[in-house]
């Protein structure tokens, strides 16, 4: 069964450093997403990406964040200068629009900013 | 504004007992409705979804959910809980048009006792 894969599973970084979280969506999916879940809180939408551009973003997704689909298979989330409050589980997801917004999620990357 | 309410933060049931997890939503129109499960240290797995048609939907692992438009609810049920069902359960909604992202509830943690 096809699945969304994310790497790394856990990343520890120092405050102020740049991090790149990587995702390989399901190959025939057209929409890509990043969500995050701060420990003990609900899953929150960050950004959606379609046709090589951002289609929606939340207020969380400020100038410190960027997304890219560099090679047609990977989908990355970059945090330019990490803050302590960026510590969270980051989930990548993908979907096919014509099925409705049924998103398939990856296993997540736990980001710890120290 | 869209919102998803899961009023029960934590539920404990005995193995073999029945289970009902509540979910209420506030949305401009009937959205797509989903239940996801997150086992410890794992990602989000789709349990079931409602798009249209029969308001009682069947999912994986013996779960079902009933959409009640009049109550804006989408409660998850299972007739007999197994110890492996212990996890965090998230209700989510998505728009039928426009933005393709999901809005999640705060989750209900299920503990199963022998």
Image (cartoon, coloured by chain):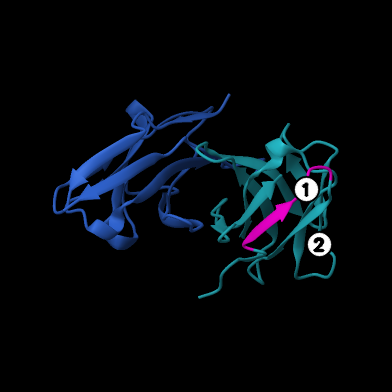
| Residue located farthest toward the top when viewing the structure as drawn | B1
Chain coloured cyan in this rendering: A
Q: Which residues are magenta?
A: A9-16
Q: Quadrant of residue A11?
A: bottom right
Residue beneath label 2, please?
A69
Residue A5 placement, left or right of B67: right
Residue A38 placement, left or right of A24: left
Chain ID for label 1? A
Q: Earlier in the sequence, mark 1 or mark 2?
A: 1
Residue beneath label 1, please?
A14
Q: Colour of chain B?
A: blue
Question: Is residue B96 shown above or below A12?
Answer: above
Q: Position of residue B74 (x, y in %)?
A: 35, 38
Front residue (pair A6, B113): B113
- As for residue A13 lying within the magenta part, the answer is yes
Q: Does the CB distance between marks 1 and 2 fall below 8 Å?
A: no
Q: Quadrant of residue A97?
A: bottom right
Question: Is residue A52 shown above or below A17?
Answer: below
- As for residue A55 lying within the magenta part, the answer is no
Callout 2: SS: loop
Q: Position of residue B10 (x, y in %)?
A: 33, 36
Depth-wise, is mark 1 or mark 2 nearer the camera? 1
């Amino acid at each position: 069964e096809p699945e969304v894969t994310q790497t790394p599973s856990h990343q520890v970084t120092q405050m102020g450093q740049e991090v790149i979280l990587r995702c390989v969506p399901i190959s025939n999916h057209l929409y890509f997403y990043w969500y995050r879940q701060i420990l003990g809180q609900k899953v929150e939408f960050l950004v959606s990406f379609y046709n090589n551009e951002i289609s929606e973003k939340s207020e969380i997704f400020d100038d410190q964040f960027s997304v890219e689909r560099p090679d047609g298979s990977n989908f990355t989330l970059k945090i330019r200068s990490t803050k302590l409050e960026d510590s969270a589980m980051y989930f990548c997801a993908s979907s096919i629009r014509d099925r409705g917004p049924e998103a398939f999620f990856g296993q997540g990357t736990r980001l710890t900013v120290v | 504004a869209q919102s998803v309410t899961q009023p029960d933060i934590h539920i404990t049931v005995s193995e073999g007992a029945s289970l009902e997890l509540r979910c209420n939503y506030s949305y401009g129109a009937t959205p797509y409705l989903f239940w996801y499960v997150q086992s410890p240290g794992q990602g989000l797995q789709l349990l079931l979804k409602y798009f249209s048609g029969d308001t009682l939907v069947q999912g994986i692992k013996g779960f079902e959910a009933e959409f009640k438009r009049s109550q804006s609810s989408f409660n998850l049920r299972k007739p007999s809980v197994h110890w492996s069902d212990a996890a965090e359960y998230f209700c989510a909604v998505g728009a039928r048009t426009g933005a393709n992202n999901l809005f999640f509830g705060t989750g209900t943690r299920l503990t199963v006792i022998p």
